[in-house]
Image: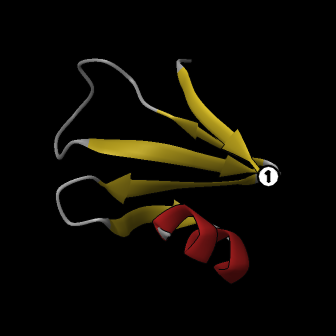
Amino acid sequence: MPEISRFFGIIITMYFNEHNPPHFHALYNKYEAQFDLSEGAFFKGALPSKQARLVLA
């Protein structure tokens, strides 16, 4: 799993040649969410609101 960034316990990963739309994964404890790169918005999974705001920032 290619790790792009790690901050405040949040791990950002991105996989090569994965399904569309282009997106990245954010992992925090037992939570996982996917964020669309073109929209800059959450589209699947769940993160606590504080961590979701940090990822979007």
Left or right of residue 54, residue 16 in this image: left
**For residue 11, what is the image quadrant?**
top right
Q: Is the residue 39 above or below the residue 13 in the image? A: below
Nearest the viewer among 57 and 19 is 57
Count of picture labels: 1
Disc 1 marks a residue whose amino acid type is: Lys
Q: Residue at x 17, y 47 (%)?
A: 21
Quarter of the figure with the N terminus: top right
Percent across and percent down for residue 20 are 16, 40
Which residue corresponds to mark 1? Answer: 30
Query: At 43% across and 30% down in the image, what residue appears?
Result: 14
Q: Nearer the viewer, residue 57 or 22?
A: 57
The correct choice, above or below, for 49 with respect to 11 in the image is below
Residue appearing at x 21%, y 42% in the figure: 22
Residue 46 locus on image (x, y percent): 59, 67
Relative depth, front residue between 50 and 34: 50
In the picture, residue 48 is in which quadrant? bottom right
Q: Secondary structure at mark 1?
A: loop
The relative height of residue 21 versus residue 31 in the rendered view (above or below) is: above
Determine which quarter of the picture holds residue 3.
top right
Q: Residue at x 73, y 48 (%)?
A: 7
Q: Position of residue 42 (x, y in %)?
A: 39, 68
**For this view, does 53 lie left or right of residue 23?**
right
Residue ranking furthest to the bottom: 49
Q: Is residue 13 above or below residue 16?
A: below
Q: Residues within 10 Å of mark 1 (few under 14, many from 20)?
A: few
